[in-house]
Amino acid sequence: METTVDYSEEDVQGDRTAGLRLYDRCEIALRGPGAFVDAAVRYLWPQARPVCVHAGLPLVRLVPGRIPPSLTRDAAPRPITLYASTDGRVPDYNEGVEYRGVPGLDRLVVNPHTGSRILVSGSEVHVVNTDTEAGARDTLRVVKQLVTTEFEAAGAVTIHASAFAVSGGAVAVAGPPGAGKTSTVLAAVAQGALMIANDKVYASTDAHGTRIRGWTDPIRVVDAPGAPKRSVTLAAYFAEDLGRLAVDPLPLRTVVAVDVGTGPVSVRCEELDPAAGLASLHREVLPPRVRWLGTEPPAARRPPLPSADRFLRLTYGYRDAARAMEMLLRRLDA
């Protein structure tokens, strides 16, 4: 059912709709300017599969435009949290404002930092913004919200870690921002490993252990020590070659705590005390997503924390990545 709210739409002539199945669990119809839909599909690769668009699909739509100011005139605002960040890495998206009692809507949420108006009506979410680029970012954030809460409803947790696959098992690379997680995974991929994730993984744990799969965040590439990072989508970095990624869930075999230095550093790969390694892994478990859309399924209660069979510590200098990976991969085969 289309929302009854009227917009001042600046450009809807090129609108397109794509049906997507994400991670084999979450189906949506994504609608907006054609260039946005194309870019979003590339952003969500390889975890997005095309599906037929039908009336029963939840709709996430980007609308370049504005809502009439009168829409919120009689609605009471209240501050809400849009994303619970424990380290402040997303300061532009933590706080929002929610309006209830808006005619024709279940709720209207404003991101004051980007200017987006997020209109929720039943299973439809419309992101309205005169700044198409800012609106596109918030539309993708809505998609992430839906995917992550689907995982959490099934008892999974999100881990702040990069990951690669060797010999049918997953290796999670953990460490604080700037420790070299992405550099380590890309160096492993250059040695023949398969990419799982650049920054976050979804982990499901039961009596048989933990299985993980990766989110599709762009890779933040550093071309040289001290150079600024640039973002490259997985689709662009791997030229949409599925043979270089591990898309399906894999058992988590090893956790590697990494520390990459910018100067000369002795290459070391050593066993890490399992208790310390497990504690470091659990520190990277992110808090459950705040449910602010109203369309998300409830979270599973107290999901099991992830576990692994082995824990290592890897230390090396930026220029010694290839040698460090040779050492690490030999250690993993041992």
Image (cartoon, rainbow, N blue to C red):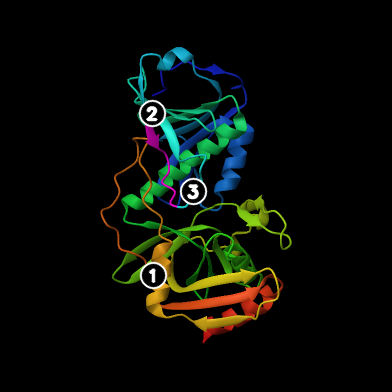
Which residue is drawn at the image coordinates 49% and 41% (left, top)?
A: 141
Which of label 1 and label 3 is nearer to you?
A: 3
Mark 2 residue crowding within 10 angstroms, few (<14) / some (14–19) / many (20+): many
Tell me, yes or no, whether the highlighted magenta stretch contains residue 290.
no
Dot 3 or dot 2: first in sequence order is 3
Circle 3 residue: 88
Is 146 displayed left or right of 33 in the figure?
Answer: left
Q: Secondary structure at mark 2?
A: strand
Circle 2 residue: 98
Amino acid type, label 1: Ala
> Can you tell which quarter of the image residue 204 is in?
bottom left
Amino acid type, label 2: Glu
Q: Position of residue 152 (x, y in %)?
A: 35, 52
Mark linked to residue 279: 1
Q: Is residue 303 above or below residue 276?
A: above
Please state the extent of the stretch shown in magenta in the rendering: 79-86
Question: Which sits in the foreground, 206 or 95?
Answer: 95
Magenta residues, dominant SS class: loop
Q: Quadrant of the N terminus?
A: top left
Dot 1 or dot 3: first in sequence order is 3
Question: Which sits in the foreground, 61 or 128?
Answer: 128
Q: Secondary structure at mark 1?
A: helix
Which residue is drawn at the image coordinates 46% and 48% (left, top)?
A: 22
